[in-house]
Image (cartoon, rainbow, N blue to C red):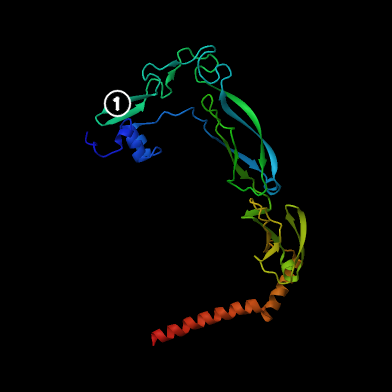
Amino acid sequence: AGLEGMGGFEDYHNAQDFLREFLGGSSSLFGDIFGPRRRGPRPGHDIQMRLEIDLIDADRGATKTVELTRPDLCVDCRGTGARKGTTPATCDYCRGTGQIVQSRGFFQMATTCPACGGEGARVTDPCHTCRGSGRTQGKVSLQVDVRPGVDNGTILLLRNQGEPGDPGAPRGNLRIQIQVRRHPFLERVGNDLLCRFPISFPQAALGGEIEVPTLGGRERIPIPKGTQSGELFKLKGRGMPDLNGRGRGDELVEVVVETPSRLSARQEELFRELAELEHENVSPKRKSFFEKLRDYFTEDADGDERDSA
């Protein structure tokens, strides 16, 4: 009565219709007040699984076979849960609505029927195959196309390969998370590949060639004289393909100069001679370091003298 004269309320059949329009039909607040709305057959839930592949598969793409155990509709009762030749009976507690509605003055509160669980029907003569659940477990093999460029965490979606829905509703989806196994020599960084390659001290000092692994096979690259540990050499286009088709990354070869842990008598003699030569003829980079170190201590000494004065 308090709404008389406001206009338009007569177009709504009850308070639920009015508030549904006011709050929006998809509003969670409406569901909190009135409980779940009856809908049609519910689609199935999604299934998630993990698929391990090699880096070469992520580079070139591959077709993999996955096997999984998933629920299926019972073939005898076709998902109804009732014995073959029978049908579920209408729930006499909620009279098939799936909800119990209680009036509280202006509002109507709806809750899920505790007898049928909101289904609106009850199985009185259950199927012997699925014991009234309407579902049976079955194994299935599926072909999965792995696109070039996939990385750890990439999700492949197979539609309608998840759990079955209610009779007449579609299946859920199958979500496959990619896990790329570690490569013995190559590490992926974005679309680039990083290869840490050890070289000897003579190779670094005198230069030469090294043979590095790539996803396409071996490749030789030159090492210039005086190469320092940690320097990077780029192999253009030898990285991973972009998942969206935007070219390929590069392979970065990081050289690591190894210090020998065991020396023969002759090797030790040569290194001692080299050490003596380096003491007399310091290389520019090393000389620069020692000059900076000398200036650093000199500045500290001058500062201490000023403070004492």
Percent of width and height locating residue 78: 55, 19
Residue count near mark 1 (Cα–Cα under 10 Å), binned few <14, some 14–19, many ≥20: few
Please, is residue 249 above or below residue 177 in the view? Answer: below
From the viewer's perspective, is residue 199 above or below residue 141?
A: below
Residue 162 in sight from this viewpoint:
yes
Q: Residue at x 40, y 17 (%)?
A: 91
| Up-down relation of residue 19 to residue 277 (above or below) | above
Relative depth, front residue between 229 and 280: 229
Residue 285 position, x and y percent, is 64, 77
> In the image, residue 184 lies at what x, y percent?
68, 50
Q: Name the residue nearer the viewer: 209 or 298.
A: 209
* Image coordinates for residue 247, horizontal then vertical, percent: 68, 56
Look at label 1 and name its amino acid.
Answer: Gln
User: Hey, which quadrant is residue 31 in on the image?
Assistant: top left
Q: Which residue is drawn at 72% across and 52% down?
A: 215
Quarter of the image with the C terminus is bottom left
Q: Is mark 1 on a helix, strand or loop?
A: strand
In the rendered image, the residue lying farthest to the left is: 2
Residue labelled with disc 1: 102
Q: Is residue 33 visible?
A: no
How many marks can you see?
1
Q: Is residue 208 left or right of residue 15?
A: right
Residue lying at the far bottom of the rendered structure: 309
User: Which of the two residues, 27 or 53, is positioned nearer the viewer here?
Assistant: 27
Residue found at x 58% / y 19%:
75
* Quadrant of the rendering where the N terminus is positioned: top left
